[in-house]
Amino acid sequence: MQVVGYDTGTPALHLATSDGLDSVALDPGTELDYRLQDRHCAGTMHDGHHISCSNDGTPYCPDHRHTWVCAKCTGTCLKDEMDCYEDHAVYLAAFAPDTFKVGVTRLWRLETRLREQGADLAAHVRTFSDGRVAREYEAELATRLTDRVRVPTKIAGFGRDVDTDAWDALLSEFDPIDTFAFDYGLDLADSPVAETIATGTVRGVKGRVLVVDHRGTTYAVDMRSLVGYEFDTGGTDRDLQSSLGAFG
């Protein structure tokens, strides 16, 4: 079986097996017992079926890699014809302890998008009638705020609180339409150890990061780093970095 995708909304890993497609739900308390084998391109999906690919590129080879051009838009449409004629929200997202991001999404997806990113706090600051103008405003704010937060930066903030003084100071420059605070139920006292494993007891999922407990250590797994791996049962057989608490 091969990991061919993942879901952050209803957290799950999607697997291609000899019998077709399957999913492993990542509900808290779920026991994962997989060993990572070879990794290669995760292939593609067509009409609900998985088409495998043996190319080396991971998680996708050049033949199956797709770039969403809207993610690169700064107000100048990169498509043949602009098609984002619906309300778009410009938002600010806070990642503990003090990383603040600006972003754009379709208005109806706002809260979903924030959860997909694993934001701790957020604010909806402007609404625009189309994506082009929203992207222009985002690009303006991105001259002083980041518009991308890498997963290692997010993981480093797990188990920590947002610097609310700095966050409140940023929001004082705007008149937020709405604000959000998210709790992912991870109950972390410290930052977990970043690893690529699929073994352990699921503690929860924050954005695309899966958090598992294994042998006294809590690990944070970027689910994208699992895509393309062949899975076998039996749990990991690698020597893993442990947290200091594992030796207590």
Image (tube, helix red, strand yellow):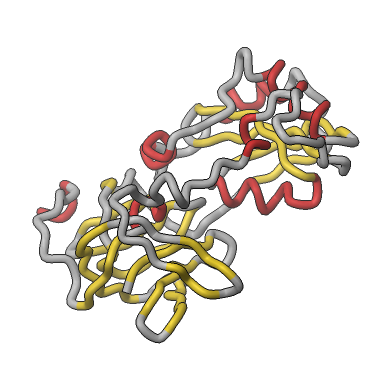
Q: Residue at x 10, y 54 (%)?
A: 247
**x then y, percent, for residue 85:** 88, 41
- Apparent side of residue 170 relative to residue 228 in the rendered image (left or right): right
Quadrant holding the N terminus: bottom left
**x then y, percent, for residue 222:** 38, 50
**x then y, percent, for residue 237:** 11, 65
Q: Residue at x 40, y 86 (%)?
A: 19
Residue 128: image quadrant is: top right
Q: Residue at x 86, y 35 (%)?
A: 130
- Apparent side of residue 70 relative to residue 190 in the rendered image (left or right): right
Q: Residue at x 28, y 46 (%)?
A: 194
Q: Nearer the viewer, residue 175 or 2?
A: 2
Q: Nearer the viewer, residue 142 or 157?
A: 142
Number of numbered discs present?
0
Q: Residue furthest right?
A: 129
**x then y, percent, for residue 38:** 21, 61
